[in-house]
Image (tube, rainbow, N blue to C red):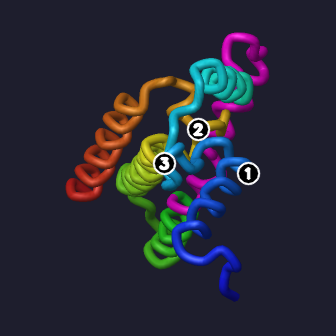
């Protein structure tokens, strides 16, 4: 439907409602909608709440271990390992022999490539802010997005190199 205010007045009213709802955008004194910075105290409180959500120094060793296990997602690696083991079983059933080194190489390459996927996803989620309060993010646990991305890329290179060598 149409607004009873119409035109610019409706835009200003909408901006004022957004300001009340979200605390950031509101109409300026000139009657036009605009964004205004929140005060330092409000921003500091938000940062403190974010830090509290992430935990940190107060976490117990058991809690940190649980967070790391959630961050590295061990069940995810079965997606790469199981097909290699099934193929190895077929090779053994067909030939009666199993090339252990080659099988191990494929398992390792699969794990490295899946680790790259997991770590690069965490790094890009951190870049976009999606994982800002996700405690079990590798980036949040280490505090080093660029380092996580470097390790991820090394894992991809190692996995792809191993596959090429095999």
* Mark positioned earlier in the residue sequence (1 or 2): 1
Q: Is residue 164 magenta?
A: no
Q: Tell me, for residue 132, which label it has, or none.
A: 2
Front residue of 31/124: it is 31
Residue contact at pointers 3 and 1, CB within 8 angstroms? no
Q: Residues within 10 Å of mark 1 (few under 14, many from 20)?
A: few
Residue 102 appearing in the image: yes
The CA distance from mark 2 to mark 3 is 35 Å
Q: Residue at x 49, y 71 (%)?
A: 87
Highlighted range, magenta: 54-80
The CA distance from mark 3 to mark 1 is 21 Å
* Mark positioned earlier in the residue sequence (2 or 3): 3
- Which residue is at the far bottom? 1
* Mark positioned earlier in the residue sequence (3 or 1): 1
Q: Tell me, for residue 162, which label it has, or none.
A: none
For disc 1, the marked residue is 21
126 to the left or right of 61: left
Q: Nearer the viewer, mark 3 or mark 1?
A: 3
Quarter of image, res 52: top right
Residue 131 placement (x, y as % from top left): 58, 43
Q: Nearer the viewer, mark 1 or mark 2?
A: 1
């Amino acid at each position: 439907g149409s607004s009873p205010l119409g035109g610019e007045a409706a835009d200003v009213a909408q901006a004022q409602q957004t300001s009340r709802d979200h605390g950031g955008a509101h109409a300026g004194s000139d009657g036009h909608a605009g964004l205004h910075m929140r005060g330092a105290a409000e921003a500091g409180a938000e940062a403190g709440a974010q830090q509290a959500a992430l935990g940190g120094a107060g976490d117990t060793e058991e809690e940190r271990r649980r967070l790391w296990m959630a961050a590295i997602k061990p069940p995810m690696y079965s997606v790469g390992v199981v097909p290699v083991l099934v193929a190895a079983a077929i090779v053994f059933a067909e030939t009666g022999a199993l090339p252990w080194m080659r099988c191990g190489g494929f398992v390792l390459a699969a794990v490295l490539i899946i680790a790259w996927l997991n770590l690069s996803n965490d790094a890009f989620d951190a870049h976009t802010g999606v994982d800002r309060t996700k405690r079990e993010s590798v980036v949040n646990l280490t505090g080093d997005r660029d380092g996580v991305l470097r390790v991820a890329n090394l894992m991809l290179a190692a996995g792809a190199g191993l596959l090429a060598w095999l």
